[in-house]
Image (cartoon, rainbow, N blue to C red):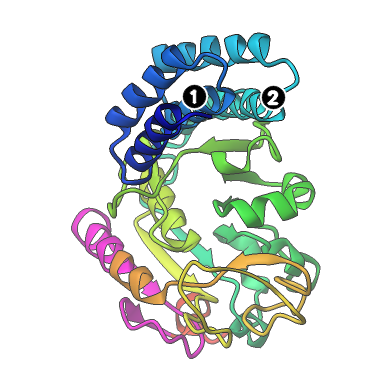
Amino acid sequence: MHAEEKALLARASQAANTGQLGDAVKLFTEACRKFPHNVRAHVLLADVLLLDWFPPAEQLATVRKLIDHTLRAFPDSGEAKQRAERLQAKETQITAVEQGKKRLEEFEGKHRGERCVIIGNGPSLNRMDLSFLKDEFCFGLNRIYLGFERFGFTPTYLVAVNRFVIEQSAADLTKVPCTKFISFEGVPSVMPADDLIVINPRTWEDVFSTDPRQGVCIGSTVTYVAMQLAFWMGFDDVVLIGVDHKFATQGTPHAVVESQGSDPNHFDPNYFGKGIKWQLPDLKNSEQMFRIADAYFRAYRNKIVDATLDGACQVFEKAHYKDIFFPSGA
């Protein structure tokens, strides 16, 4: 690679790395034109064009043409084949989300005026008699299925949006006998089905989504996603249990770690057991998002009540779960 070629690719890469994607596209396109035998120019241009979570149709068509050309010009290039697979996965995800948008319409206001329970996965669940949940509308989160047999209930809905959770638990998640809302990041590990709806998680802005067809904010925790879905379904009251909001494992928020032993942070030691990759919590940002959810429910519904036993979150109104679900002392 001669000096001009190397310099142009370096400028293009710098533009991409600093978020100047328009300039990066122009520079990589120029490199492809000037140096048609440089496979790196072609695959890096494809990378930039695929950075959008949901590229417009015309942009996808451009990428498809670029990758087809690259494969013809460099049939032995592993990088070109890798980009072709990435494009196929992106197209599969987009199709799944479009199907999910239509399915979400079925749930708008479905539970208007009713109450639901959002079940976190904290150790406090082990100190509760959860038999009452079989008579409630419930949102289970992530690997809640590990406790079904012991707890004696199956949730009405299950929500999982973390890519690591979905990819490592895909087979188990798809078997859970309830309606599931799964992030498109889990596609193609999981695929749309009659009881599995793919949603678009929005990670680029902190909002409370009142229309999940336009995307659902992650808010640093799947619990926040469940709150937005509950709002869309029309639930007036949300009761939280198992949202302990404290972790024995410490570290940089969102950092990906691999568990070295039993899990002390959840109701089951195998939840994120040895060898499982997971992301460390961001409790501070979670609280910020919870305050937004609390404000929305108080303004447009009724309220969110935190009935977690000894939970550390101080955002929501507190109550003991027995006072809510067993008011007569039964």
Q: What is the tally of numbered marks visible in this picture?
A: 2
For the residue pair 324 and 261, the one nearer the viewer reads as: 261
For the residue pair 65 and 286, the one nearer the viewer reads as: 65
Residue 241 against residue 221 in the figure, above or below: below
Q: Which mark is residue 81?
A: 2
| Crowding at mark 2 (Cα within 10 Å: few <14, some 14-19, many 20+) | some
Q: Is residue 316 left or right of residue 253?
A: left
The amino acid type found where label 2 is placed reads Lys
Q: At which x and y percent is residue 18?
A: 31, 46
The reply to whether residue 240 is in sight is yes
Specify start and end residues of the magenta stretch as a single range: 290-319
The amino acid type found where label 1 is placed reads Glu
Quadrant hosting residue 225: bottom left
Quadrant hosting residue 23: top left
Quadrant hosting residue 260: bottom right
- Between the C-alphas of marks 1 and 2, the distance is 26 Å
Residue 208 against residue 186 in the figure, above or below: below
Q: Secondary structure at mark 2?
A: helix
For the residue pair 196 and 274, the one nearer the viewer reads as: 274
Q: Residue visible at 27% across and 59% down?
A: 297
The mark closer to the camera, 1 or 2, is 2
Provide the residue designation for mark 1: 98
Q: Secondary structure at mark 1?
A: helix
For the residue pair 147 and 93, the one nearer the viewer reads as: 93
Q: Which comes before the other along the chain, label 1 or label 2? A: 2
Task: Residue at the far left: name it.
Answer: 299
Residue 189 against residue 35 in the figure, above or below: below
Q: Is residue 193 left or right of residue 213?
A: right
Task: Residue at the far front: name it.
Answer: 2
